[in-house]
Image: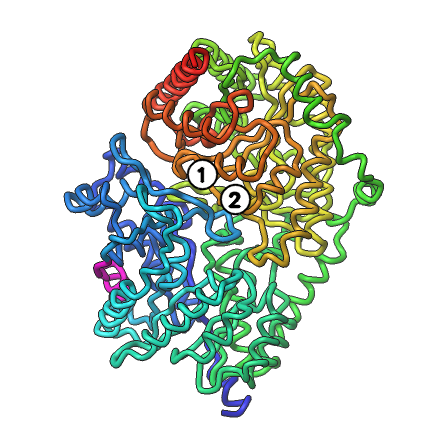
Amino acid sequence: MTAKSAAAAAQATVYGYPRQGQGRELKKAVEGYWKGRVDADALRATAAELRRTNWQQLAEAGVHEVPTGDFSYYDHVLDTSVMVGAIPERHRAAVELDALDGYFAMARGTQDLAPLEMTKWFDTNYHYLVPELGPDTVFTTDSTKQVTEFGEALALGLTARPVLVGPITYLLLAKPAPGVAPDFDPLTLLDRLLPVYAEVLGDLRAAGAEWVQLDEPALVQDRTPAELNAADRAYRDLGGLADRPKLLVASYFGRLGAALPVLAKAPVDGLALDFTEAAAANLDALAAVGGLPGKRLVAGVVNGRNIWVNDLSASLATLGTLLGLADRVDVAASCSLLHVPLDASAERDIEPQILRWLAFARQKTAEIVTLAKGLTRGTEAIGAELAANRADLASRAGSALTRDPAVRARTAAVTDADARRSQPYSERAAAQRAHLGLPLLPTTTIGSFPQTAELRVARADLRAGRIDDAGYDERIRAEIGEVISFQEKTGLDVLVHGEPERNDMVQYFAEQLTGYLATQQGWVQSYGTRYVRPPILAGDISRPEPMTVRWTTYAQSLTDRPVKGMLTGPVTMLAWSFVRDDQPLGDTARQVALALRDEVNELEAAGTSVIQVDEPALRETLPLRAVDRPAYLAWATEAFRLTAGGVRPETQIHTHMCYAEFGDIVQAIDDLDADVISLEAARSHMQVARDLAEHGYPREAGPGVYDIHSPRVPSADEAATLLRKGLEAIPAERLWVNPDCGLKTRGWTETRASLENLVAAARTVRTELAGS
């Protein structure tokens, strides 16, 4: 096929789309179902309407082939576990009694059933439910969801492509089930799993599917020869099926590396590759294997993870280079648009000049369609779009909003000494114990307390002008008073003010720092029904005035016990924002760190003896390839130390991380030089405590004993059991007792009971230690 005829075949598509709806209708329907206000039929009707709306919007925008199966009530990896029958034994009865309630029991748990473990989806802020597998796992096929949703799209007269998590990625994301030997390798189940995938493909083919997409993002990570051989075997088997739909194997989040030749020679019909951050690497590798003769290439040239407008001319140049490397070249985003908000045109408070720089899911879809049109018909067919795009890019590049000379001068003057504490940890620890006077196994929480309806109403009233600043402050003071009183009565040792004034742990700070923009409708799914509005980091960062000092010192005035100052760390401020792409991330991190350093120093000057700088995103931002990690960890850990490096030895610096795999960043955790770290551990059964012990981590740590992402109230005995497991790895004099994460999403009833049990567990284990 000539380049000209290849261009004529170019089509626009996407791999997935935001699920929630413009008004977060899915969140409201699911949470209404949990509370008994919405029945199952109404929930299903809402979901079907959201799918229909998404598909029609895509089709009307000019997308030729819409995705199906990417929609989920909670998580697409959990949906895959249902599809292949990988239901944990403890949940089988619940699933058999009611499939929908059983599904949510796996996701959230119940008072009697622990949920599946939850962790980050590669290096994004999306969380997935980890499959639990073992040598006795028996896979069974249930393609109902996949076939039904595909049929819905066909009924609308649309060309549709079902999307499935691929078998290799599914097994590589899985973990040994409870009670299974920790060295069990789920990939050994591949031969059992492939016949189930074959049945699903057959069911979709019978339903009319011409193409099916199999997502294999795990292949952009470093993979062993055995894992690559498994991928080769999987796609030889699936590609060799006699009666199957055409197979499009999709990778994203980076370069394929050694997996590309494996997939290129497999008997599949097309590949989808990321040509944004990994453009040069994937393009060169594709050329090195001789391209994809006779196959379809879906080129992800629009960034699906950030919100800046695409450089259309640059993307067209990449697409033009690809034309000779495949039988057909289509245009897409680099990954599912799940990771960006729905529609930038819904924003009313962002200056029109800046709004021109932004592209959410609907705008990215338009970019994809424009690029497909340009690839097919030539640049003259999209001349107006190219001219407007060049003007938008020039507007951003030349804007004074993006550069502050004073910030840049301060960042350039940073020295190595600025990022070091004045004394080593061993000396600081002695000073802190003498200063704080805490008991063995000190108890604390991570920071936030339940965000009640009354607090949300107060914020809405303030925005609407129904109350003034004084009235709002009165409500916040009352809430802080209740939180402090509860913690004192419960017996917690290090208190928090509960963060009632904060809408979100990143957005709250972003709204008070220069260089950040806040959205009103920029919701993105984090997990389940938890949606966040990541702020947009558009310019240089500085802190005009204190952000937390007033409320922290007010809380401290109410108690003799230490109250932690609570800040979000520089890496998380980047990771949970849509970060600027016009300078190195390390430079931006130092700017944020210096702004936070000013806050840390003022908290200390105001009498705060314990300051927590949260970095839950340190692990999730870790590059997927090992070769890229040292450079990232160097600037990431430096940014944390720069934030906290100016305090006195007796000031105790805490940090917090949650819901990620920590084993491969323990050295980086050590390099942070925090005095205390709290980490998620309840769902992962204290694995992180063992990881710290194996590394010889010398500081204090609080592996969580209360899973706050489930409505379950852990008993005192359950918490004590986890504490004892923690003590097997961490000495009692360095072990803290705390929940896995903040309590913002929990209700007061379960929070009270859970924290009372947590304190009771600590007291029980203290007594055991005293008597041993």
Is residue 477 located in the magenta-colored stretch of the structure?
no
Left or right, 662 with respect to 684, comes to: right
**Which residue is identified by label 2?**
663
Badge 2 marks a residue whose secondary structure is helix
Please provide percent x and percent y for residue 243.
25, 80
Q: Is residue 565 above or below residue 333?
A: above
Residue 564, label in figure: none
Residue shown at 35% from the left, 46% from the top? 181
The count of marks equals 2
By secondary structure, the bulk of the magenta-drawn segment is best described as: helix
Residue shown at 68% from the left, 62% from the top? 393
Direction left: furthest residue: 97
- Residue 339 visible? The answer is yes
Q: CA distance from mark 1 to mark 2?
A: 9 Å
**Which residue is identified by label 1?**
687
- Please state, as top left, top right, bottom left or bottom right, where the C terminus lies in the image: top left
Residue shown at 84% from the left, 41% from the top? 413
Is residue 142 located in the magenta-colored stretch of the structure?
yes
- Magenta stretch: give its range: 139-151
